[in-house]
Image (cartoon, grey):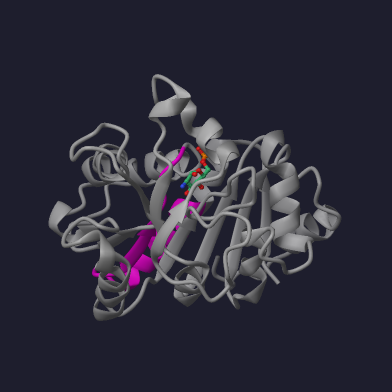
Amino acid sequence: MAEVVIVRSMAAAGGVAADAIEQLVRRNPRAVLGLATGSTPLSTWTALAARNLDLAQVRGFALDEYVGLPAGHPQSYRSVITREVVEPLGLNPELVRVPADSGPLETAGDDYESAITDAGGVDLQILGIGRTGHIGFNEPGSSFASLTRIKTLTQQTRLDNTRFFDSPEQVPMHCITQGLGTILRARHLVLLAFGAAKARALAGAVEGPLTASLPGSAIQLHPRVTVIVDEAAGSDLVHADYYRYAWNNRLEWERI
Ligand code: GLP
């Protein structure tokens, strides 16, 4: 089962996630990170940037990208990753890939899968979760075996992401996303969630039945998952007391 860490604040959560990344990069300066966009990972990037680690050799693969935005659009995930991750952390932009960043769209999914495989696979994948229970842009109904491919966004997700655009119509209808099968190949999953609006999806992902209707529940198939939440996002967890007890009594040598 996932290790669930319930913390008081987003900043504290970012610190726990940054610890996991720091440990990894100290072991392997050429580690491969799975990068997520959205507001959820921001405290992780902030905490990591404050540590002044040398991340110049780290390789990165973004989870997903909109389809149909002009190149350089400020809300394209390429732009977001550059602004919020690559620049503040001092990553080498040439070592950071985003789906469909080169070549024809028709083969972009297969190309991305090959690039991840050629890099040796993702060591640590940062994940947020959408209110529909999606991870990456794998909306309800996504196969647990799915690989990187084009998807149609739900109206709920488009509405949720309207805050980044001037109007709902400007939010693209299509995206390209790593599949659930792609995500499950990463060696360590770190899923973060904050706020009451995420409580239902988060509890479904961690404790609910395995179902394509809640794509985040795929994490239950993974042997190494760390879920980091604030009290509000963790408020629907049935076993919250046990998670706190286990975390507070973890053994010194246990890594995150
Ligand atoms: C988007 C992204 C997801 C992200 C989710 C939650 O749809 N594709 O990767 O996890 O939204 O976003 P936020 O972290 O802003 O709540």
Residue 160 at x, y percent in the picture: 55, 33
Residue 32 highlighted magenta (yes or no): yes
Q: Quadrant of residue 101?
A: bottom left
- Taking 41 as reference, is 75 above or below it? above
Residue 251 at x, y percent in the picture: 66, 70
Location of the C terminus by quadrant is bottom right
Query: Residue at position x 39%, y 71% from top?
Result: 123
Task: Magenta stretch: give its range.
Answer: 17-38
Location of the N terminus by quadrant is bottom right
In this rendering, position of residue 163 left or right of residue 60: right
Residue 190 at x, y percent in the picture: 53, 60
In this rendering, position of residue 251 left or right of residue 125: right
Q: Looking at this rendering, what residue extends furthest in the top direction?
A: 166
Q: Along the line of sight, which residue is nearer the eye, 217 or 68?
A: 68
Query: Residue at position x 16%, y 52% from top?
Result: 93
- Taking 100 as reference, is 158 above or below it? above
Q: Along the line of sight, which residue is nearer the eye, 156 or 18?
A: 156
Residue 31 at x, y percent in the picture: 30, 69
